[in-house]
Structure formats: C-alpha cells, structure tokens
Image (spheres, helix red, strand yellow):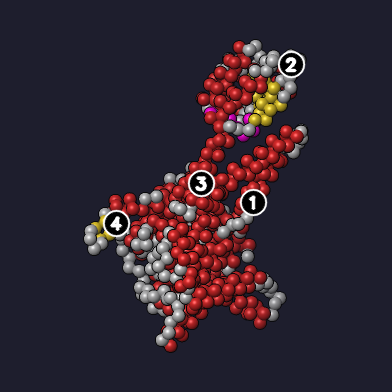
Amino acid sequence: MPASVKALGQARPSGASMAPQARCCSPAALQRRLPILAWLPDYSLEWLKLDFIAGLSVGLTVIPQALAYAEVAGLPPQYGLYSAFMGCFVYFFLGTSRDVTLGPTAIMSLLVSFYTFHEPAYAVLLAFLSGCIQLAMGFLRLGFLLDFISCPVIKGFTSAATITIGFGQIKNLLGLQGVPRQFFLQVYHTFRNIGDTRVGDAVLGLVCMVLLLVLKLMRDHVPPVHPEMPPGVRLSHGLVWTATTARNALVVSFAALVAYSFEVTGHQPFVLTGQTAQGLPPVRLPPFSVTTANRTISFSELVQDMGAGLAVVPLMGLLESIAVAKSFASQNNYRIDANQELLAIGLTNVLGSFVSSYPVTGSFGRTAVNAQSGVCTPAGGLVTGVLVLLALDYLTALFRYIPKSALAAVIIMAVAPLFDAGIFRTLWRVKSTCVLARHTHAPRTLPTVFRDLRGTVAAGGLDLLPLCVTFMLCFWEVQYGILAGTLLSALMLLHSVARPKMQVSEGPVLVLQPASGLHFPAVEALREATLSRALEALPPRCAVLDCTHVCSIDYTVVLGLQGLLGDFQRHGVTLAFVGLQVPVLRVLLSADLKGAQYFSTLEEAEKYLRQEPGPQPYNASEASVPEHKVALLKA
C-alpha cells in the first residue's frame, strides 16, 4: 500500500490525543466530528481506483449476505438490503476507520430475532431506539463502559451465537418445514424430522458449501501480484481474485440459475426465497405504534415487549463494531476514535430506521474483504451503498428464485470462522503459565508444589468460568448469558481489588508489599495479614509496608492505616512505610497519622527498625521530607 495511504490512517487522531481545550468550532474539533475533512483534501485518482474496487467487492459480498441475514433475523429478505446501505453513506462522513463497513451481521441478526418476534415494526423501532442510545453514549463519551465486558464473555457469546446461527440454518439446508426457532426445540425437531429431508435442497446446499469452501481456500492461497509479472498472468490473477472475493454472489447466482432452470421445466425441487418486495424502501418515521386486526399496540407496550433488547442490542452492536475497527486499525497501523465510532453507528441506526432498517453494526467478514481489496478511505462505502440501492431497484424480482438452502450455505460458511475452539485451551495455558511463573523462584518443597498446582488449576478455571457460563446460558437467553458472564467477570475483578496479592518477606523485620495497589475494600485483608504475621507472633515484631505499587489511597484506607498503627503502638512495636508515591505521601502527611514512620528505601527502614545507625524517618513536618519529595509535593 502506498505510503500516502498509510499516512492517511495515521493522520486521524484518536479521542485521547485530542487537546481537551480545543474549542468546539476550531478546525481540529471540526475534523474530529467530521473525519472526512481530514482526508478529503488529499484525495487522489489512485485512491479513487482502489476505493472503487474495494467498494465493488464489498457490494458483491453484502447483497447475498444481507438476504441471508434477514432470514436469521426472522424478517422478509428485503429488510436485509434495507439495512445494508445507510451505514455506507453515514460512515463516509463520520467514520474514523478506512476499513470498517457497517451493515447487517449474523450476530446482530440473531439478537434482532430474539427481541422483535419476527415483526418488521419491532425491528425498525429497535434500530431507532438503539441508535438513540448509541448516540447518547457517544456524546457523553461512555465508550469506556464496553471495557467492562471481558474477552471471555465476548468469546463465549460469539461461540454460542455461531452454533445457534449455524444450527438454525440446518432446517433450510435440508428443506425441513415447521421447525421452531428456539434453540433447544430446534435441535429436537430437526433430528425428529430428519427423515423429511428434501433431497434437492440437501444436495444443492452441500454443493454450495463445498464451492464456498473451495473459493475461500483459493482466495487465501492466491500469490501476490508483482510488477514484473506478464500482463496475461496479472489479468488471470485479477479474474481469480474477483471470483473468489465475490464468491457469495457467485454461488447464490449459480443456485438461482439452477432453480430458475427447474422452474421453467415446471418441476421445482427446492424451497425458494419467494416473492420479495420490489423497489427502494419508503422514507418514513419509525413505527411508534402498531395497529393489528384487534387493537393498537402503543409505544410503551412496544418498548416493554422488547425489554432487555434495548440494552443488549445497542451494547453488543457497539462492542462488535469497535472491536472490528480496533482490530483492523492495529493491523494497518492507524488509530480510531472510539467515541466518534459510537456516533457513527448510532446515527446509522437512527437514520436507517427511517428506511426500514433493523439494527446494524460493523461486519468483520466484509471489513476483511474491504481491507484486502486495498481500500484507502471510507469512500469505498459509497460504491457499496449505490450497488445495494441498484440491486433493490432492479434485481428484487429475481431474488424470488434464490433457494433457501443456498442462503443457508452462505450463512453457515460466514459464521463458521467465528467459533473459536482454541480459546478454552488458550485461557487455561495463559493463566496457568502466569501462576507457575510467579512461583518459579520459590522454595520447591512438596507442600509448595501441591499448593502451586492447586493455584494453577484454580486460576485456569477462574478465567474459564465467565466463558463457560456465558456460552451455556446464551443457548437459553442471550441477555442472561451476557449478564451472568459480565457479573462474574466484575466479581472476579472486585475480588482481586478487595483481596490483593501480598508479597511477604519473613525475617527480624516483616515486610509486606501489596502486589496490585491498595483500595478501600482491601483494608481489612491488609489488616488481617499484618496482625497475623507481626503482632500475633511471639514476640511481636516490627513491620514495613512497602507501598511501591500503591498509587492512590482514600479516606477509608487512611482510617484503616490509623487503626493498624494504633495496634502496633499498643504492642510496643513499629509499623514503617516505604516506597510512597507522591499522591500517597501527600495524603498521609495531610492526615498526620500518629506514630507513622516514613522512609525513602526499604534498607533505611530495616536499619532503623533493627536500631542500627542510619537515616531517620520523616514525619508530618514537610521540613523532614527528602528534598526531591518536597519538590514533587509542591508541584
């Protein structure tokens, strides 16, 4: 890729790097809100050519996928296309990643099917409300909340969704009818009705899957083009690359042609997609009420019916999109603005709801196609959006001939790479290695070996716990799986804060060092560790609290340390503090703790407590604080 293209990505500042004092109308602030202003002045014909090729490639990928994902969402096929073009135009103006494409995805379609009861009105309203929530999070800069959803939770949800989506297409692949959409009932009825398999659908579906797999392998193993290659070789390379990149469109077109051929003969062995609404979607307000044959469902009832979907759908949409954007920004060496991405996806969903779109997010598969096609700017999305609109206007009459088994093959092959079978082994190995590394240099007695082994098993199991809980519960209800996994991760995080690891050095002087900071929930644990090792020993002995890893403390910690100092004084021994960082030292000096002794180094503290000649402690008087600390305190 040309150096100028790389510079384009690097020129986009992230939210963190923006000067906070920039005025709202300054050029920098304007470029932050409209990233198109950062790259459009330097746009060139070379970029136009690469963007056109990338946009065309993504367009040929998204059209069959959108039709297939509408089936996953339980909506008519045209709603997949209605959802596939608005993100292209919005992201052209607001996106901070040159690679990301917004549109319907397998996981978002699955969530939509859970919360919209296969009713288009619910899906469109959910897109509008999700967009409003995402916009609010972007304006309030709440993107950091997504960081509390840990990787094991995401992997557990994604893997469960992959199985749910993939198995949900088995009925279409085999031509089975009357199979419910709930996962466990789906498994039961699929195996119960396996004898009713339609041979035509099964054969066509398996052939489509094989063709998609072969074309994908060809795409992965096509050698790169070199300038010294003959023109004929470059032309054949381009044809192979185009065919393998547009493999979804190619296979679906092949299947539709086969189905049309049978239709002409008067015998149809396949279950077809059926009639699709023709033309562009009407521009209208989202449905804030729905009129049925019996009554009118009000807006409040619609919201109550969607329930947890109003939290799960926008959050998972943001999570998926930002994860995709960060992944490709890291690969291609540029930065994104996470809060600006929230605004882009939020506005996409809000505006999309006016053209009957259901909630969308960033697509990993199509973003990969975009990046591999050499896209330079978000302008490639314009080509994709126009291609989808042309398909809606001119090709919808032909979509009725697409066999459902072909779309099922597209979905299964699209979601299969999302299942990460190695994550279980990876989590176990990484966590276990960390535990073993901590004890590498410890004395290796037999009890120590068994204790380390138990710690290794427990540590590996703890990281697997949110993954497994999320994975299992998502088959029942998605929101319960995500909520349970997130709560487990939060509890594990809180436990590490409330019970930090203590590095203890035994000797005439006890040295305790909190290994991961000191926050108010950890005060009681610190108190118990210190009392049991220093004051309950016979005779009681002095102790040193090494605060090297403590960067801040609060009033509760100060009270706990004050009580601890009182306990030491009553036993006639001393508690000394070393390694105090400036913010901690400032708080402790202000608190004027009675009997507190502060030292710059551990050696000084040990000498003083062993009553050897050496530097004296400094106390609440600033005059006794070392000069370098005084300068920092005044700063």
Q: Which residue is drawn at 56% across and 32% down?
A: 498
Q: Which of marks 1 and 4 is in front?
A: 1
Q: Residue at x 42, y 70 (%)?
A: 177
Q: Residue at x 62, y 20 (%)?
A: 531
Element under disc 2: loop
Cα–Cα span, label 1 and label 3: 18 Å
Residue identifier under label 1: 426
Look at the image and give the residue range highlighted in magenta: 514-520
- Which amino acid, by three-letter code, is at mark 4? Phe
Look at the image and tell me in which quarter the N terminus lies: bottom right
Q: Main secondary structure of the magenta part?
A: loop
Q: Where is residue 543 in the image (x, y as percent from the top left)?
A: 67, 20
Residue identifier under label 2: 610
Cα–Cα span, label 4 and label 3: 33 Å
The quadrant in which residue 347 appears is: bottom left
Cα–Cα span, label 1 and label 2: 48 Å
Q: Residue at x 54, y 61 (%)?
A: 364
Q: Does residue 28 appear anywhere in the picture?
A: no
Q: Position of residue 346 (x, y in %)?
A: 42, 55
Cα–Cα span, label 1 and label 4: 47 Å
In this rendering, position of residue 571 left or right of residue 364: right
Inspect the magenta stretch and tell me whether residue 515 lies in it: yes
Q: Which mark is residue 485?
A: 3
Element under disc 3: helix
Comes first in the chain, label 1 or label 2:
1
